[in-house]
Image (tube, helix red, strand yellow):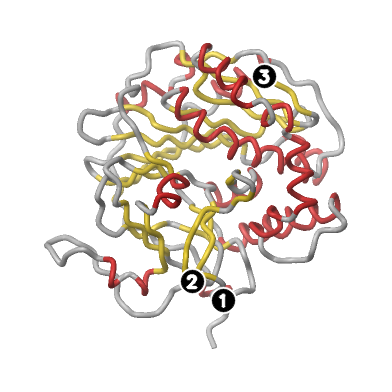
Amino acid sequence: MVSLSILCLFSISRLTPLPNVSAEKEDSQPSSYKVLQPLKSGDLTIFPVVRSSNAKSAEWQYITLDEGLKNGEVIVTEAGRMRGLVRSRGPGIWYPPGDGAEVNRLVLINNSSKPLLLLAGEIVTGGKQDRVIGKDRIVPPQSDPVDLSVFCIEPGRWVQLSDRFGSAGKGGFSFMVQPTVRRQAMVAQDQQKVWAAVGGAISRMAATAPSSQETTSYARTMQQEDVERKVDEAGAPLLQSREQLLAKLRQEHAVGVVVAIRGEIVWADIFATPEMLAKYWAKLVRSYAAEAVTSPWQQEVHVTQEDAERFLSAGQTGQETSVGEAGIYRYSETHSGNITTFVLRSLLPGTSFDVHISKVKTEPDSFVRIHH
């Protein structure tokens, strides 16, 4: 019998390495953004980020994974179960082989009239294993089947609980994995490290919510009542009045956030428009709040606006690689010291702008102080 640890390697997405073009990086330069005064919720601090130059993408609309799964326009399934959903056998269409599910592969079709935006860290539940998307990407409207880059976040299960795939969530909220798990999927790109991060997050969450039931599933852990309450409490000021808060952020033209846990800056998410930030606000805040609940750091340091600005400015040069699909998108990854920057750029007709930027501190200073 083949071990689950071997079966559960991340899928090799059919992406093409693209040449680096420096002119395409102008939107992601630090001079394009400004950091505002922080919003604080317990151990979680969020600095809104505004664009200092005019966005080029206000007229371009994307569908999110949550929207597509909810209205049925986006279909996700395991690769071997895809045959009945392929629309044609035309030239260039990838036709997944086999009739059985494969734990290390998911396939997606976008039947919407809009391009689909997928973010690394988004959870897809269903089938025989919960998965997390490993890379940002854009899927064009009315797409042919797309082989997704995914990691397993539920070690030990290979039994189908549902043949319907959906986004993880409860009570109107969907969520993505917290930064410690998201970091391993995006930066390390290593299944064992993803599992280790999942196990650590579940253990620390169980310690803060003793009545939670034992499970190896990250998604089911996060959906338990005690855990959900802890996470909601950690992000309460940013979630309970989110419509008023988002209205204020729209007036400021905020397009992203820099995130600090107990004063340690760990992450940034920046979008093309305030509307896109608003769509992902609850999902992102809950992932940051989960990080605050499970943080192993024992001490809090003071974090300033200037610290957040320095984080945005750091890591602009370094070793860069990029993949993508010609005429659809480019996804670049730049490593510089302990900071990695990911930029998803739209190449669809009539577009040429950064849709989403993630900036990741790969080894936070507090982690170094406590664990080394």
Q: For the residue marked with disc 2, what is the amino acid?
A: Val
The residue wearing badge 3 is 307
- Element type at mark 3: helix
Query: Residue extending furthest bottom?
Result: 1
Q: Give the answer, above or below, for where 61 lies relative to 180.
A: above
Name the residue located 77 percent from the left edge and 36 percent from the top edge.
234
Q: Nearer the viewer, mark 3 or mark 1?
A: 1
Q: For the residue marked with disc 3, what is the amino acid?
A: Asp
Query: Which residue is at the front of the view, 185 or 43?
Result: 43
Q: In this figure, what is the number of numbered marks?
A: 3
* Residue 326, quarter of picture: top left
Specify the quadrant that holds the N terminus.
bottom right
Query: Which residue is at the front of the view, 210 or 328?
Result: 210
* Residue 231, quarter of picture: top right
Image side of residue 109 versus residue 251, left or right: left
Q: Give the answer, above or below, for where 236 lies relative to 87.
A: above
Q: Give the answer, above or below, for where 166 lies relative to 64.
A: below
Q: Residue 314's x, y, as percent?
A: 55, 24
- Count residues near mark 1 (Cα–Cα under 10 Å), then give few for <14, some for 14-19, many for 20+: some
Q: Residue 41's x, y, as percent?
A: 76, 27
- Element type at mark 1: loop
Q: Nearer the viewer, mark 2 or mark 3?
A: 2
Q: Looking at the image, do the residues carrying marks 1 and 2 touch, with CB atoms under 8 Å apart?
A: yes
The residue wearing badge 2 is 103
Query: Which mark sits nearer the N-terminus, 3 or 1?
Result: 1
Q: Looking at the image, do the residues carrying marks 3 and 1 touch, with CB atoms under 8 Å apart?
A: no
The residue wearing badge 1 is 158
Query: Which residue is at the front of the view, 188 or 38?
Result: 38
Q: What distance separates the C-alpha of mark 1 from that of mark 2?
A: 8 Å
Query: Residue extending furthest left?
Result: 91
